[in-house]
């Protein structure tokens, strides 16, 4: 297939224009149309991308047979309906994260993609981030040993959402990265939080995920913090890895040290530090890598790294997190249905 | 009272020699005797402090009428018996943290002190740390607003204890500091952890404490970490305070920023950062300040900042944390008896 | 004057497109034409700014009576000729830094501006950088005391120029910032360097500038460094100020400490540290502030902060630096002619 | 030789007690006597080291035939006389840095050692610092390529000496480390400074040293700085090494990157960063390693790493630096006599 993928974008809020820009920069694709309910936003698109057609009627994109794929970058509550319509019209679909606001909606989207036999990819950009990919490579190379736990700090000041809480706002990143790194599905979820600024909207959540292997992942998610933190520490039985996305250099550090099983009478183990290695990380924008991956998957019929199933797993974890939150932090099953089965 | 306080020290392990050194440096006190079961440890004491008497029979210190006070720096399981004997012998007592391994032991020690009418102080050194005291001063000065939550990172590699878990090893610091700062008793406790290196000994624990005011405190306690972290972030409704004990300068930073209640239709709040101020912190050793305070309290009959009640509250929180740990992280009452009452 | 300033840009290399972008974003100006010898570069301009006219014949901009001002962003050797022509055609002129490659060329440009009675502004962007302006404010508010010395680290890896050395590449920043902060003209210059990568092109230079007040400024300029450093430390007799442009927060820190004159017999002075304060710095792009200033100066006939005289002073310092470099680092007069006078 | 080296220490100021402590801790040596003119200082020694004999008459140490070696830790002006007397009495001699205040005094001490056939070692502690030794190992392993230049920041607030300037106070560290790393003698020296706090006593000096290989070393030495800096950056033709003594971890970092010779028409080279590696550095105290080395050299008749010649080279560089300072920063020969020869 030599011709460019012709892509329509629905939603011109925060992510839409970024998608259009990247689609216009990567080879193999072409942004042809943008749909949004706001004329003002469409005007901004036209000014910046004169060659792109705009419309307030998103179904025009589905009706246009020259359009091969659509990117859905609208509020999460609209994802299911739009994705189902897009698949029904025979389009490949890229959906911004999270895939849906409920497990049943996410499952419906996955089923629609299967029925249509088209590509479904979810915009979990971080699993295309070069530093995250480098950590995955390090973990798979097995010098790190068994992953025992992952601790994440994802906090910053401001940018309070009014329709979703911090679990749904920042949590998709930690969940998608953790599932990508560990390659296993969660067993249980626990989430405790508090609403300090807006009633009923948690602005701080402590999320914990347990895995069948015994690994646990913990994330501090907050819109209330003096400085922006984006660190994830992976504790392996042999080495430890620190990923700090705020750094411009040394985003990833491997600590060649660890703790062996204790034996005998010794009261305390003394500190055993080792060499620290920081691999070079390419600086390519993750969103661009993600768009290239989408184009490649559509063209070659490959399964995306962040396919529908991956997106569904994230929604399952977040929905379970909400159940835990609503019960004051009790440990809940990742798949409650599976328990009943 | 012009004469020096004559002090005996029981236990010459890690803390004992530090207590002897500080007692010999501060005015108003004099370390006169050290008791320990190990002749080797006593030999080390004699070499370093030739003027100090040593014995393997700790009751000699109780029998010595010239001794005014004793410091108990032995394993936690022995605290109750030693403290009760000391009070019975009419001594003032300083007990290393935690006060006891169970609430009932801690209560017994507090009662013994009351009966004897003598000073009981618990070695929560951190509440004498100049940086911790400075944060207390900042919080009380009220520019910070209502404290919403406190997040603590207290992690490092190595020094695994074989008899207690990381909650009892590192947790007393976070609990004592938090109670000192907030000045209120906890309402509920939640703790989740895992045992990666030794069976049955948690080496990582996530502790959460809820307060009647609505404030919550969260602490990540771990013996498994690539680097040593000692940060506590206090999120106030008006300002935020960061206390980083690993720094040599700028241990405390006040962030003049915050988030006001949202109103209207606005989708997101933009970031509002402000000035950052880092007050000068005196560099006096906390243990020395603690010893001076003990001497002063004994001499003037004052209530110590870390008195028996304060030590008891820490034990209550830790014991509740153990109950939560054993039930997979369920939220438990800080005072289960109070619920029954 | 209500109508927008109509601006032509000559040179579409690195700075040209940035100037066009900022001119199209700020109110009161409009980029109308771009001239460059390269059709390829002009094509890039047309793609990004469809409304802007392009030409390979720069004199068309001078001949166009609808153009009020031109920005010259060409190699430094062409500045004099282009600026003289522009003034002769009655345009206001913005020249990228450095103003010229020799003092005599710089003087000629300044004279041409005076003759034409038009605005001449030099693109010393850093004196419009909000952090640099904040330091100026702090120094003028006089709590810092007398400035004793300024130490600058301006180093990074790569980006070796082939036509100019590191003194002319990075030096204009330190010289323009220092002269802006101190508000006095240099007395002497000293520069030592070495050519490690290319023959005859210094890639590392240590520059020192002496002032009549006794202040000295020292800068380490280098294209060979493991990490990018952009720090300037101002040592005042009462306080010290650290400006670190690499930081995203805490770009400016004021250290409330200092050293008083010694007296008596004391052998050593002990360290006296104090509070540290980091004022909030607005995040506006310096180039935009610079463009707004240019528009305002043209419109209101005001003298620009970085006017021709300021640009000339920088060229004087750099030319003196070259004389010192060529004589192995001897101290040379800033104004050799002044000595003869 | 199985018996311990019996050592006398002359001078009980800052370094003396540290020497006594280390001599009492390392195997193979024994501090037997301390001489000082101040009874107060001797009293402090007796209190801390009851077994050590003290005297105000230093010649008693020379007369005592049971003493094998003396450590001279007195003001620099007294080094020559004391060392000559010690060698005349047949002692091995350790002299604190710098070896002497003038080249002729340093030469006299070296000659006295040669005549006596005894060990002479100079207390350049930094060349025994594990991080400095690790950098030497890295440089010798040759992956770094040719050393092009070394930049050092050695600044801090306070501790102004009243008898010597910052060049003689902090400069010995940079000079001794640089000569140890490069293994070649300087060719020329340049030093510029200023006296801000005390008249005639430079509190800031910029020192530059040129070497026959083309390498240059630059050091910023200052008693006036907001924060303590102890960084030395080594720029090699293939790799770069950063040594930061203020860090507790990652004291040494190797940057796997560099710049190759340019060719062709390219205007600028793009940044080429690489992996960063931080080797584990043992935490042994440098002074203890130094004392062990002294004992070993005396016992086995080995040449110390910091022998008399090494100490003399440092004095030559500092004396040349003073000549340059006094002439306003002119470049002066490292060995002016050699020029005349």
Image: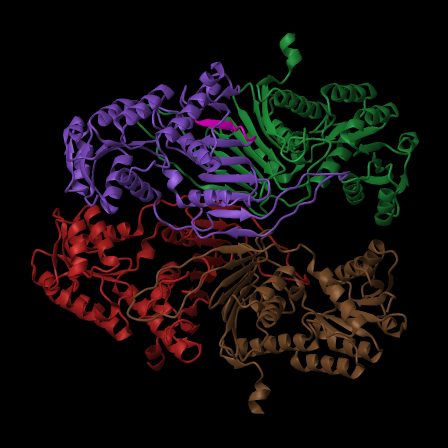
Chain colours: A purple, B green, C red, D brown
Q: From the viewer's perspective, is residue C256 above or below residue B183?
A: below
Q: From the viewer's perspective, is residue C153 above or below residue A112?
A: below
* Horizontal relation, residue B36 to residue C282: left or right: right
- The residue furthest bottom is D341
* Horizontal relation, residue A139 to residue B122: left or right: left
Q: Residue at x 50, y 73 (%)?
A: D216
Q: Quadrant of residue D27?
A: bottom right
| Image location (x, y in percent) of residue A24 | 22, 44
Q: Residue at x 51, y 25 (%)?
A: A187
- In which quadrant will I find the N terminus of chain D? bottom right
- In which quadrant will I find the C terminus of chain D? bottom right
What is the magenta range? Answer: A202-214
The answer to if D171 sits in the magenta stretch is no
Q: Residue at x 54, y 80 (%)?
A: D187
Q: Is B175 or B260 nearer to us in this picture?
A: B175
Q: From the viewer's perspective, is residue C295 above or below residue B296?
A: below
Instruction: Evaluate whether residue A75 shows in this view.
Output: no
* Horizontal relation, residue C288 to residue C51: left or right: right
Q: Quadrant of residue D182?
A: bottom right
| Image location (x, y in percent) of residue D196 | 53, 65
Q: Is C339 or D331 nearer to us in this picture?
A: D331
């Amino acid at each position: 297939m030599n011709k460019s993928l012709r892509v329509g974008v629905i939603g011109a809020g925060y992510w839409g224009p970024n998608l259009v820009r990247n689609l216009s920069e990567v080879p193999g694709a072409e942004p042809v149309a943008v749909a949004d309910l706001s004329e003002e936003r469409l005007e901004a698109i036209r000014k910046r991308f004169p060659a792109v057609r705009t419309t307030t009627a998103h179904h025009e994109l589905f009706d246009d047979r020259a359009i091969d794929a659509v990117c859905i970058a609208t509020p999460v509550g609209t994802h299911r309906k739009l994705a189902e319509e897009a698949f029904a019209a025979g389009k490949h679909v890229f959906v911004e994260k999270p895939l849906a606001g409920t497990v049943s909606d996410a499952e419906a989207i996955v089923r629609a993609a299967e029925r249509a036999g088209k590509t479904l990819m979810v915009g979990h950009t971080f699993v295309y981030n070069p530093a995250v990919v480098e950590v995955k490579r390090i973990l798979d190379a097995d010098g790190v040993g068994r992953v025992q736990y992952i601790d994440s700090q994802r906090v910053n000041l401001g940018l309070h959402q009014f329709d979703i809480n911090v679990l749904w706002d920042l949590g998709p990143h930690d969940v998608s990265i953790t599932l990508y790194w560990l390659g296993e599905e969660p067993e249980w979820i626990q989430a405790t939080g508090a609403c300090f600024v807006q009633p009923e909207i948690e602005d701080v959540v402590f999320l914990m995920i347990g895995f069948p292997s015994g690994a646990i992942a913990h994330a501090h998610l907050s819109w209330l913090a003096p400085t922006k933190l984006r660190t994830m520490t992976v504790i392996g039985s042999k080495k430890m890895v620190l990923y700090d996305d705020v750094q411009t250099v040394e985003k990833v550090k491997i600590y060649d040290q660890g703790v062996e099983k204790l034996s005998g009478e010794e009261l305390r183990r003394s500190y055993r530090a080792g060499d620290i290695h920081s691999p070079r990380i390419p600086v390519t924008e993750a969103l661009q890598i993600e768009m290239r991956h989408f184009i490649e998957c559509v063209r070659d019929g490959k399964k995306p790294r962040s396919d529908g199933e991956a997106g569904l797993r994230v929604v399952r974890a977040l929905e379970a997190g909400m159940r835990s939150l609503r019960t004051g932090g009790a440990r809940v099953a990742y798949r409650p249905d599976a328990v009943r089965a």
